Amino acid sequence: MASITIFGSGNMGGAIADIANAGSNEVQVLGKEDAAAAVTGDIVVLAVPYGEVAGIVEARRDQFSGKVVVDITNPVNQETFDGLDVPADSSAAAVIADALPDAKVVKAFNTTFGGTLAAKEVGPLPTTVLIAGDDADAKSSVADFIEAGGLKAIDAGSLKRARELEALGFLQITLAAGEKVSWNGGFGVVR
Amino acid sequence: MASITIFGSGNMGGAIADIANAGSNEVQVLGKEDAAAAVTGDIVVLAVPYGEVAGIVEARRDQFSGKVVVDITNPVNQETFDGLDVPADSSAAAVIADALPDAKVVKAFNTTFGGTLAAKEVGPLPTTVLIAGDDADAKSSVADFIEAGGLKAIDAGSLKRARELEALGFLQITLAAGEKVSWNGGFGVVR
C-alpha cells in the first residue's frame, strides 16, 4: 500500500486514480482548484498536459522533494502535430527531472491510452505500463501500485529511455488521430 | 506482383524474402558476394546492418534512381547500446534519403523482429509492419507486397515519422536484450 497524489482528474488522471484505488492505496486527487492543498502522497502523478507541468513544478518544488514524481506526458506540439515540444535528444521527463533535482522522477503511463488503462486490456493483451527512471526503488513503487491495480508493468530502463517512450507515445497518438488504430487500441506488449 | 531486390540474407533479409516469395513476386537476393550483380527489382530492401548501408548506397546510387528503397535499420550504437548513431532529430531513413535524392525512400520492418515476421504473429496479434515515407505510391507498393505475403501493414505517415519508428525499434531491442520481452514478442499493434 502506498500514498498517491494525482494532479489532474481528466481521462488519464481518472483512469490512474481508479488503478490506485483498486490497489487499496491512499489516494489524493488534486485539481486546479486545489492550489493551496498540501500534497499528501509519497508518489505524485502529474496527470496534466505537458504545458501545465511547469507551473505545478514551480509552485510545488519544495513539496516534491524526496518524493517519487511520475511524468505521464506526451509533449506533442499542438500547432504542427508533427513533433515534440522538447529537445530531440531529451524528453519531457528529463526536463522535469532537471527542474526537480531533489525528486525521483519516473516516466510511466505515456504509452497507454486512457481507454486501455481503464479496460486493463489492449485488444487480446493485458495493458502493460512501461516505466523508465534512474531510481530502482522509485520504479518498483510505481510498478507495485500498477500491478496491485490489475495491470502489468515493465521496467524499460533508465530515464534516458523516456526519449523513446515519448516517441512511441507520440507515434501512437498520430496513428489514433489518423484512424489507423482506435483510441482503445494501439501498441500492446507481448512478453 | 512486384519485382523486389533484397540486400542481405540474414535473419531479417531471409524473413522478408519469404514474405516476398509468398506473394508471388519476382525476388532477387543479393549478398556481399554479389557486388557486381545488377539490381533487377523496382523495390529494393536494404536488409543489412546500418553500418553497411552507406557502402551499398555509394556503390549503387545510380542503380537506385527512381526505385523504391526500403530502409529497415535500427541504427543502435553498438558500443554504448544506449542511443542511436543518427542525429536525435533525424533518422537512418532520413540520412539514406538525403544520400539518395532520386530514390523513393521508405522506412519499414524496423519495428518487427525477424521472428515475428516469420511467424506472421506477435503473440495473439497478426504481425503488423509500420511504414513511413513521403511518396504515397512507394508506400502502397511496399504495403501491397507485405499484405500479399500474409502480414498486416499500416501507413504511419511521412518519412519524419521514421524518427519515432526507430525509437520504437530501439526500445523494443533493449527490452528483448534485457529479457523483458522475447525476441518473438515485443510491440504488437491493436487496431
Image (spheres, coloured by chain):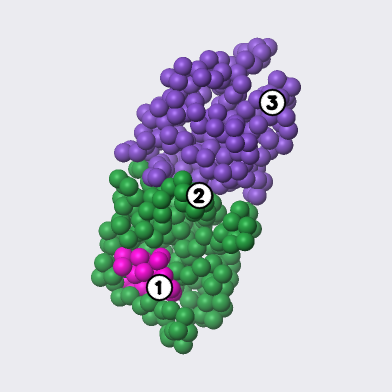
Chain colours: A green, B purple
* Labels 3 & 2 near each other (Cβ < 8 A): no
* Labels 1 & 3 near each other (Cβ < 8 A): no
> Residue A40 is drawn in which quadrant?
bottom left
Residue B148: x and y, percent? 44, 25
Q: CA distance from mark 1 to mark 3?
A: 52 Å
**Above or below, comparing residue A173 to residue A34 in the picture:** above
Q: Is residue A1 visible?
A: no
Subunit under mark 2:
A
Q: Is residue B47 visible?
A: yes
Residue designated by label 1: A9
Residue B185: x and y, percent? 38, 38
Q: A190 or B52, which lies in front? A: A190
Residue designated by label 3: B66
**Above or below, comparing residue A60 to residue B72 in the picture:** below
Residue type, label 1: Ser
Q: CA distance from mark 3 to mark 2?
A: 29 Å
Q: Is residue B190 magenta?
A: no
Q: Which mark is drawn over residue A178?
A: 2
In the drawing, does residue B40 fall left or right of residue B14?
right
In the drawing, does residue B163 fall left or right of residue B175?
right
The magenta region covers A2-19
Mark 1: secondary structure:
loop
Residue type, label 2: Gly
